[in-house]
Amino acid sequence: MWEKEPTGSTSLSEKVPIDPMIETSIPIDEDSLLKSKHGIVVPPLKLHNNNSNNGMSSPLLVNGNPNCNDSIIENNIDKNENNNNKNSRSNSTYKTNKFSNFLFSNKHNKHRKVPRLVSKTGECLIQPVHLPNAKEIVLKNWFHLIIEYSWRAILTVFAGGFLLSWVVFGSIYYLIVYINGDLTKTDERLTCIANVRSFSSAFLFSLESQHTIGYGFRYMTENCPPAHIVLCIQLVVGVFLQTMLAGIVVAKVLRPKKRKQEMRFSQFAVIGPVHEHDHRPALMIRLADIQHRLYLAESHVRLYMACTKINKHGEKELVGVKDMNVGYDSGWDRVLLLWPIIVRHVIDEESPLYGITQETMKDQEFELIMTVEGIVEATGMTFQARTSFLPDEINWGQRFQSLVVYNEEESAYQVDYSRFECTEHAEDVKIDPVPEVIEEDDEHPLLHNASGFT
């Protein structure tokens, strides 16, 4: 399964990317590099004592986290290379596995590149094109779109809206006094607006009227009904503008965007046994709420799988999205986020991952999308945080280390977030292969028994 790297290859000793917050240099011996059958060059992985100083190469820690002192990667090569031989199954058993058979068939996975639908930070990367009435849709939702802007843009709109209203109505007042000839009249009793002799004084009168400052020096007389109508319109517009702009600022302050940024997902998912006493294979993702002063109510998680295929026209299209059970049938999807948790999806005959192996996983075109929703107790507003995992972001035969430990000196439980990404080697994971069946026509892929949506 592994072959020696040719001697004429370019040196690969370089910095190895680790945790997004940490980076270190790990020397790699060129002679000890191995090459997999997929062309991926990796160093040989050995289990040894971190404190040993016998000239051995530096240990490669799980996920590259130097805080994982007791979790060295072992050579987790699947010893059962022949487990892809299809076992005969009854039709009733296969009915729950049609999605898996379609996903892991070689026919639909000739193209290796897997584009993201959702970024690691939760942004949707799908680009709408040829959207009808796009401008009309934007104008109908202008209030919600403005809230999504940055504070700099919102404060600019806030100040610009008031300034524009003062200038517009000030210009109207100046036009009225100009037409009425107030600029040349000396008797203030015959003017429309007393003591308005220039555009600057008309602007000040507009500002004082809209905000009911009323200094008393500039005032409106009863000689000009058009000015009375303009004043009434300005007062209505001013109240509406002030309410609207103040509402935007308040909504921006109360929106739980910052709250959802305090949700932390592990950078990698792992596939391993549920725990040491339950050897069922499971996909596991670590989740934590790092805000320990503002708690969440009614928080729950969801996990979806989205996969693509090449249609008969040679175009890559999204086949559909399947809901992956994370305990919603028994209520375990409603999670308690007082401390970091591990979300598990058991890979059984109902799972879209049923039939996957360590060798076939990296060649698949699918994306796992995880969402967590919650209600902020302080405001009662709901938020949703998202992330995604590609096949090369799933570690096989690993499990997360425990974070919550009891400190006897402090007489309290403590959460060590430095070990958030730390995993350790688990026993070999074995997943039964999907049985062979005669596939239906490509126009009707075997998805009608897969719960989900397209």
Image: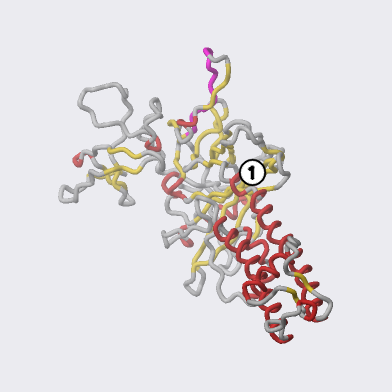
Residue appearing at x 60%, y 57% in the figure: 321
Task: Estimate how packed mark 1 is, as few (under 14), some (14 to 19) or many (20 or more) residues with alpha carbons within 10 Å.
Answer: many
Report the span colored magenta: 399-409
**Snapshot quadrant of residue 300:** top right
Considering every residue shown, the one lying at the far top of the view is 409
**Snapshot quadrant of residue 246:** bottom right
Front residue of this view, candidates 72 and 194:
194
**Snapshot quadrant of residue 240:** bottom right
Question: Picture coordinates of residue 448 (x, y %)?
Answer: 66, 59
Residue appearing at x 37%, y 30% in the figure: 72
Question: Picture coordinates of residue 360 (x, y %)?
Answer: 44, 50
- Quarter of the image where the N terminus is located: top left
- Quarter of the image where the C terminus is located: bottom right
Front residue of this view, candidates 391 and 68:
68
Q: Which amino acid does label 1 sit on?
A: Val
Residue appearing at x 52%, y 53% in the figure: 367
Is residue 54 in view?
yes
Task: Determine if the magenta segment contains residue 338.
Answer: no
Front residue of this view, candidates 238 and 281:
238
Considering every residue shown, the one lying at the far left of the view is 8
- Above or below, 397 relative to 276: below
Question: Picture coordinates of residue 186 (x, y %)?
Answer: 72, 80
Circle 1 residue: 301
Question: Picture coordinates of residue 125 (x, y %)?
Answer: 52, 61
Chosen colour scheme: secondary structure
Left or right of 185 on screen, residue 90: left
